[in-house]
Image (cartoon, grey):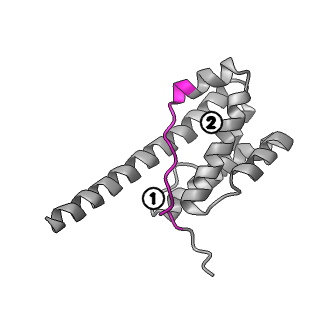
Amino acid sequence: MSTQASTTGPLGQPRGIAFAIVITIVTLGIYSLYWVFKTQEEVKEHSGIGVGGVLGLVIYIVVSPITWFLIPSDVGKMFKADGRPAPFTGWTGLWLLLPIIGMFVWFIKIQGALNGYIQSKQTERDDATGAALATQS
């Protein structure tokens, strides 16, 4: 059995940063539960890295500060597994120690990196599909 991470699984969905912030505020934080679940589930499905959605959500509900470090660490590991430089490490969680503004910086860094990763992977897959179709013609 291989323990090597692979980044060939299904890609997650890009999420609008401003939309997610506004919805989190409007729902008094309930959207953050969904975001944590989906983010950790998508990273796990795509790369095999991380705890996955259910365990990630339980960790977030029971001991939120662990999630502050866990999500950026897993996302960074996913980047490395794909041969890309990690945009951050688990230490990015320290941003959340800065009242109010830290939440925004943390979220924008993580979701921005995920959106960029997803878009670049979609472009790579589209290019590979187009090249395969061109060689068949």
Residue 104: x and y in percent read: 62, 28
Q: Which mark is residue 62?
A: none
Farthest residue to the bottom: give it. Answer: 1
Residue 93 position within the rendered picture, expressed as x and y whole percent measured from the top left = 69, 42
Q: Which residue is mark 1?
A: 84
User: Residue placed farthest to the front in the image?
Assistant: 137
Q: Amino acid at mark 1?
A: Arg
Taking the magenta stretch, the answer to whether it contains residue 11 is yes
Q: Residue at x 52, y 64 (%)?
A: 81
Query: Which element type, helix, strand or loop, lies under badge 1?
Result: loop
* C-alpha separation, residue under disc 1 versus residue under disc 2: 20 Å
Residue that badge 2 annotates: 106
Magenta part, dominant SS: loop
Amino acid of disc 2: Trp
Quadrant location of the N terminus? bottom right
Residue shown at 28%/59% (left/top)? Answer: 129
Dot 1 alpha-carbon crowd within 10 angstroms: few under 14, some 14 to 19, many 20 or more: few
User: Circle 2: is it few (<14), some (14-19), or many (20+) Cα within 10 Å?
Assistant: some
Q: Is residue 89 visible?
A: no
Tell me which segment is drawn in magenta: 6-19
Rendered location of residue 55, percent (x, y): 77, 52
- How many discs mark residues in the rendered view? 2
Q: Earlier in the sequence, mark 1 or mark 2?
A: 1
Task: Name which residue lies at 60% across and 63% down.
Answer: 48
| In the displayed structure image, the side of residue 56 where residue 101 appears, left or right | left
Dot 2: what SS?
helix
Q: Quadrant of the image for the C terminus?
A: bottom left
Residue at 66 percent across and 25 percent down: it is 24
Q: Is residue 58 above or below residue 130?
A: above
